[in-house]
Image: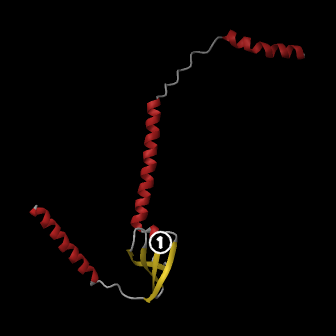
Amino acid sequence: MKLVAAWMLLGLPALALAAGTPAEAPAEPAISAAGSLMQVFIGLVAVLLLIAGTAWVAKRLGVTQGGASSLLRVVSSASVGTRERVVVVEVGESWLVVGVAPGSVNALMTLPKGDISSAATPALNGSFAARLHQMIEKRRAK
C-alpha cells in the first residue's frame, strides 16, 4: 500500500505535464522606472509641502510662542555686540534686565514693572525717515 502511494506521488508531476500546459498567463505590464521615480518624487514633494504648511499654520496661530498665561515675557531686547544682547524680561510684577551671551545669562538689575514708552518709538521712526530721505536725495543729486 505504501509503495502504491509513493508511486502515485512521484507520478503527479508527470500527470500534470500530460494534461497539457495551461494557456499562457497574461503578461504583467512592464513597470516603468521613470514612472516609479516620478511617483516617489511627487510623494516627497507632497510630504514636504504638508510639513511647511503645518509650520506656517503653527506660526500664524502662535503655537510656538506659548499662551497668555506664560510666566515670562520678553519686553524688549537690544544688541550690544556681535553675539551679546541685553534683554528685558517681565516676570510677574517686575522686569529683569538680563545680559545674554553665548554660553551665559547674567542678571544685571531688577526694575519695577513699567509701561513701554510709546513716545520714543515715533522719534526713532521720524529720525529714520529723515535719514532715509537724506540718503535718497544724495543719490538723486549724483
* Image location of residue 9, percent across then percent down: 80, 17
The reply, left or right, for residue 13 in relation to residue 79 is right
Left or right placement of residue 7 versus residue 136 in this view:
right
- Residue at 79% x, 14% y is 10
Which residue is depicted at the point 85% across and 16% down?
A: 5
User: Residue at 43% of width from left, 47% of height from top?
Assistant: 46
Relative to 85, 5 lies left or right: right
Q: Say above or below: 36 vs 75.
A: above
Say above or below: 111 vs 70. below
Which quarter shows the C terminus? bottom left
Q: Is residue 114 above or below residue 50?
A: below
Farthest residue, direction left: 141
Seen at 58% across and 15% down, the residue is 23
Q: Residue furthest bottom?
A: 112
Residue carrying label 1: 101
Front in this rendered view, residue 94 or 32: 94
Measured as percent of width and height from the top left, residue 41 is found at 44, 40
SS for callout 1: strand
Quadrant housing residue 65: bottom left
Given residues 116 and 21, the one toward you in this image is 116
Q: Residues within 10 Å of mark 1 (few under 14, many from 20)?
A: some
Dividing the picture into quadrants, the one containing residue 135 is: bottom left
In the image as oriented, which residue stretches furthest toward the top? 18
Q: Quadrant of the N terminus?
A: top right
Residue type pointed to by label 1: Ala
